[in-house]
Every structure is written in C-alpha cells, then in structure tokens.
Image: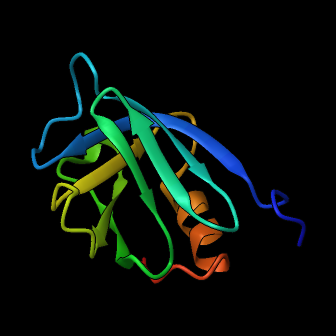
Amino acid sequence: MEKDAAQKVWSGQMCKNALTTKGPGSGAKLTVTNENLQLKGLLGDFTFTTDTVDVIEKAGFFPWFGTGFRIVHKINDYPSKIMFWPLFARSKTILKHLKDLGYNVRL
C-alpha cells in the first residue's frame, strides 16, 4: 500500500475526560493514515500509533446520541479518556478501517 493510500478523514465530535460532546470547541477531525491516527480540534491535537493504543472500543451513553468510540492509550501527557463521535459516518466503518490497519479494535 502506498504511504497515504489508506488516508481517510472524518468529521465529528470529540470529548476528553467528560461525558459531553456538545458545545463550543468539541468539533474535531479524525485523520487516519498507515502511520497513525490523529484527532484534531479546539480541544487538542492527539496523535496515536498502533504502539501507543491499547484498544479502541465502541462507546455510547444514550442511544439517541449515536455510537462513537473510545481510545484507550499509553500516552501519559494525554487525557485518560478520549472519545470520538463521527458525523455522517458509521463508527463501525471507521473501526473496521482501524482494525485493517493493525489497531486493536474491540467491537
């Protein structure tokens, strides 16, 4: 696969260390390449590789909010809980792509 052949970008909502994904600054973009995944928004810029991610798992608090996913990681300088809810895409599609790239994904 070419270096950026697997690059995909999704828009959504991000939260860190809280249950809320609404309000100013929660919008985010998830960019996934062969080398890493990056969540970037006003709440911060977080980059992960397969080596720094323990597991990526489905997360959802209320069915009417939809389902997102939680990144459980090993990076001490990052918030312990980082979650992403995609807009206009299904979490299952993103999680399958991440699994295909070698991330430990729990469906």
> Dividing the picture into quarters, in which one does residue 34 lie?
bottom right
Residue in the image at 17% along x and 52% along y: 61
Q: Nearer the viewer, residue 16 or 99?
A: 16
Q: Is residue 107 left or right of residue 75?
A: right
> Dividing the picture into quarters, in which one does residue 27 lie?
top left
Residue in the image at 35% along x and 44% along y: 66
Q: Is residue 49 left or right of residue 43?
A: right
Q: Position of residue 6 (x, y in %)?
A: 77, 61
Residue in the image at 64% along x and 67% along y: 35
Q: Is residue 64 left or right of residue 94?
A: left
Where is 94 relative to 62, above or below?
below
Quarter of the image where the C terminus is located: bottom left
Quarter of the image where the N terminus is located: bottom right
- Residue at the right extreme, as displayed: 2
Q: Position of residue 90 (x, y in %)?
A: 54, 50
- Residue at the left extreme, as displayed: 18
Q: Nearer the viewer, residue 106 or 64?
A: 106
Q: Nearer the viewer, residue 20 or 102?
A: 102
Q: Position of residue 7 (x, y in %)?
A: 73, 53
Residue in the image at 64% along x and 43% along y: 9
> Dividing the picture into quarters, in which one does residue 96 lie?
bottom right
Q: Position of residue 94 (x, y in %)?
A: 57, 59
